[in-house]
Amino acid sequence: MSFNNLDQLYRSVIMDHYKNPRNKGEIEDGALTVDMNNPTCGDRIHLTLQVEDGIVKDAKFDGEGCSISMSSASMMTQLIKDKKVEEALELADIFSKMMLGEDFDDEKYDLGDVEALQGVAKFPARIKCATLAWKAMEKGVKEGE
Amino acid sequence: MNTTIRSYFPILDQEINGHPLVYLDSAATSQKPIQVIEALEKYYKFNNANVHRGVHTLGNRATDDYEGAREKVRKFINAASTQEVIFTRGTTTSINTIASGYGRQNIVEGDEIVITYMEHHSNIIPWQQLAKEKGAVLKYIDLEPDGTISLDTVRKVVTPKTKIVSVMMVSNVLGTINPVKEIAKIAHGNGAIMVVDGAQGVPHMKVDVQDLDCDFLAFSGHKMCGPTGIGVLYGKKAILENMEPVEFGGEMIDFVGLYESTWKELPWKFEGGTPIIAGAVGLGAAIDFLNEIGLDTIAAHEHQMARYAMDQMSTIDGLTIYGPKDEMKRCGLVTFNLDDVHPHDVATVLDMNGIAVRAGHHCAQPLMKWLEATATARASFYMYNSEEDIDALVKGLRVAKEYFNDVF
C-alpha cells in the first residue's frame, strides 16, 4: 500500500513533536496542575500551567500516550504560552471545531504547528487523542480562576 | 474449514479503506452468522409478543421461543436444570448480580474475596465495591512470569476466611486458559464459593458447569455469535434459592400486597421486567450454530491459529508477545507491542489496511500494570479467521514498523 492515507494523519511535523516534545516536564512551584486521562485507551497527561495576571506564562506537560496525543500536547503548550487565559480558551474552542471538521476563524490566530493536526478530523477514533491536552488546559485554567 | 464458515458471516464480505476486511477483534465482540440474523428477523417478523402472560397465540410463540432458548443454554453448559439459567444483559450484569445478591447477603466484615491480577474490570469492581461496603478484604492471586496461575499460589492466597473466589476462565489479554476446575476445588476446600467469569471461555471451548463444579458462571451472548444485550448467569439451584433478587418489578413477582410481596420461582425471580426476548432467541440460534460446527473443532482451530500467529509475528524484529508461549495454554488471541510504536498508532496503520485489532488497556488496568505496559494491541481470532488473515496482519505490522521507523 502507499503511505498516502497515513500521511494525512501523521504529518512530519506531528512526528517531530512526538519525537522531540517541546515543554516536556513539570513547572515546580506555584503552578496549576491538571491530571487527565482517556479512560478508554489509557493515555495520560500531567499538565502544569503558570498563570500570572491572566497570562499563561509557562506550560509544561508530561504523560504517556500515542503520537497524536503527545504531539498535540507539545504543540498546545507552545501555542498558549504568553497568551491571555481567554485567548487560550478561545484557541481551545477553535481546536475543538477543527477536530469536529466545523468551520473556524483561521484569521485571528496563527495556529502554527497545530494546523498539522487538521487531518485527525478524518480519523474519528483518534479525535479524543488530539483533544486530551486541550481539555486538560481548559479544566486547569477554569479551576484556577 | 474456513471458506464455508466464513460465508455464513455476511459482514466479513466487504472492503475497509480499500482492502478486504480482516476482522481480528472477536474477543471484543464476535461477528454474527446469517443464521442468527435470520432468527432475529423471524422472531420480530412473526412471533414478537411479551412472554409469560399472553393468552394469545403470539404470546405463546414468544414464550416458547424464549424458554426454548433457556433450554438450549442449559444443554450447552450442561446445567442440571433450566432453573439454574438466568438471562441477563451480559457478563457484567451477571457478576454484579452475584455481588449485590449473594455477596451482600453473605459477606461480613473481615471476610475475604479472592480474584487474580489478570481479571477484566467487570470481575474486579463489583468485588471492590462489595468489599468496601462490608469491610471485607479483597485479595489478588499473583501471576507466574509467563502469565499463568500457579495452584500453589492459589492455595496460599485462599484461606478459611475466604468466602468468594472469582476467576476468569480465559484472559482477554494474555489468552491464558486458567485451571478454574482445580481452583474451584481449592475454594470449596476452604468453604468458599467459586465464581467463573466465562466471557472469553464459553464461546471458545466446551464448558460443563457440573464438571467444573463452579457455583456461578457468567458469560455474554455477543462474544459467541449472538446479539449484544443478552448474557447468562448460571448458579447452583441451592444457592439461587436462598438468594434474594436484586431487581424488583413486573415479571418477577408471585403475589403483590400493599406492603409485602413474594417472588416467582427460579429462574424468573431474577428476571424483573420484560426480559430480553429477542436477545435470548438470537443466543439460542448462536448456540445451534456453535453446536453445528462443534466446540472441539473451534478450540482446535484457535490453538492452531494462536500457534501460527505467534510463529509468524515472532519473525518481526522488536515485536513483544504477552502471555504463555505454549498455544495449548491459551485461546485464540495474541496481545503484543511493536517496538516503541504506540498501540493506537499500530491499530490506525492496520485499519488503513483493512485490519481490525483492539488497542488500549483492554479493561484490565491492574494487569497492564503487572505487564508494565501502558497499553497493548490485541489480535483475536474466531472460527471464521484463517492463516491468510494472520498473514495480512503480519504484512500490516511490517508496514507500521517501516512507516514509524522512517520517522524515528
Image (spheres, rainbow, N blue to C red):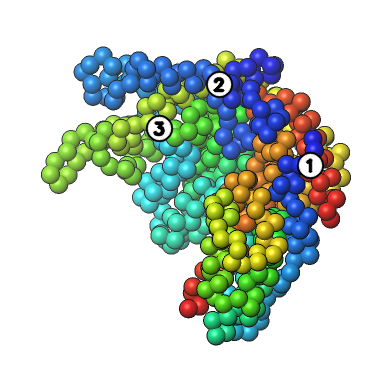
* Residue where numbered disc 3 is placed: B87
Q: Mark 1 points at which residue?
A: A3
Which residue in the structure is indicated by mark 2? B33
The percent position of residue B372, horizontal first and vertical second, equals 71, 57
Tell me the distance, in whole angstroms, between the alpha carbons under discs 2 and 3.
21 Å
Q: Are marks 2 and 3 in contact (CB under 8 Å)?
A: no
Return the chain for callout 2: B
Residue in the picture at 23% in, 24% down: B53
Q: Find the distance from the CA under tag 1 to the CA under tag 2.
A: 34 Å
Q: Percent from the top left, x then y, of residue A33?
A: 58, 75
Q: Position of residue A17 (x, y in %)?
A: 75, 62
Looking at the rendered structure, whether the residues under marks 1 and 2 are on a common chain is answered as no
- In the image, what residue type sits under mark 2? Pro
Disc 1 is attached to a residue of which chain?
A
Q: Which residue occupies the foreground of this view, B301 or A19?
A: A19
- Alpha-carbon neighbours of circle 2 within 10 Å: few (<14), some, or many (≥20)? many
Q: Which residue lies furthest to the left in this view?
A: B258
Numbered disc in front, either 3 or 1: 1
Q: Which chain carries label 3?
A: B
Say which of B312 and A87 sits in front. A87
Is residue B346 among the parts visible in the rendering?
no
Q: Is residue A4 visible?
A: yes
Task: Give the number of the mark in front: 1 or 2.
Answer: 1
B88 relative position to A64: left or right: left
Q: What element carries label 2?
A: loop
User: At 55% from the left edge and 21% from the top edge, which residue is drawn?
Assistant: B33
- Quadrant where the C terminus of chain B lies? bottom right
Q: Distance between the residues labelled 3 and 1?
A: 48 Å
Name the kind of residue labelled 3 in the image: Phe
